[in-house]
Amino acid sequence: MKKEADPRMHSAEHILNQAMVRIFGCGRCFSSHIEKKKSKCDYHFGRPLTDREITQVEAQVNEVIHADMKVTEEFMTRDAAEKRFNLDRLPEGAGDHVRIIRIGDYDACPCIGPHVKSTKEIGGFRIISVSFEGDVLRVRFKLVDATE
């Protein structure tokens, strides 16, 4: 994770991950590249998404964003966090206490990155392309003005 990661985009990534979990029952992304202009998330997945499913994911992410959910943090011991969360994506040396980012009652995830204080700060979310190769689903997205 880059130190200067965009809080809006990073918070949108968390919401996208939870939408994928809820809609498809897949895991959170195993790889991501988060940038201010556009970002991507890679998922272990068995097939490409249909146009209808792409629209469904985008709509759910925007619904959460527009719900104006509070984004909060809490800390827990690594032992407690390991019982509730997958810590594989935390960097080496993350410490004995793990920061958990909560997006309302929608998502909770260990994270070291910057986040917004409320989902309304994100704006709008657009999936710009989706590809599937070798059991990897890649979702590319950007943030737009909430009215777009």
Image (cartoon, helix red, strand yellow):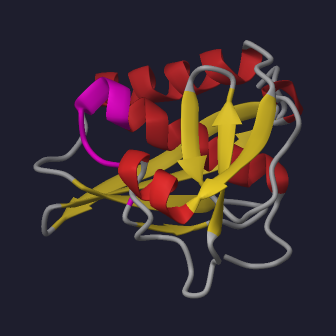
Q: Is residue 148 left or right of residue 64?
A: right
Percent coordinates x, y for residue 21 in the rendering: 34, 35
Percent coordinates x, y for residue 90 in the rendering: 54, 72
Q: Is residue 117 left or right of residue 18?
A: right
The N terminus - image quarter: bottom right
Residue 27 colored magenta? yes
Total of numbered circles in the picture?
0
Which residues fall within the magenta stretch?
21-29
For residue 27, above or below residue 38:
above
Along the viewing direction, whichever of 120 and 128 lies nearer the viewer: 120
Percent coordinates x, y for residue 128 in the rendering: 54, 47
Q: Which quadrant would residue 77 be assigned to in this image?
A: bottom right
Q: Which quadrant would residue 53 be assigned to in this image?
A: top left
Percent coordinates x, y for residue 13 in the rendering: 59, 48
For residue 128, above or below residue 63:
below
Residue lying at 86% horizontally and 74% vertically, measured from the top left: 4
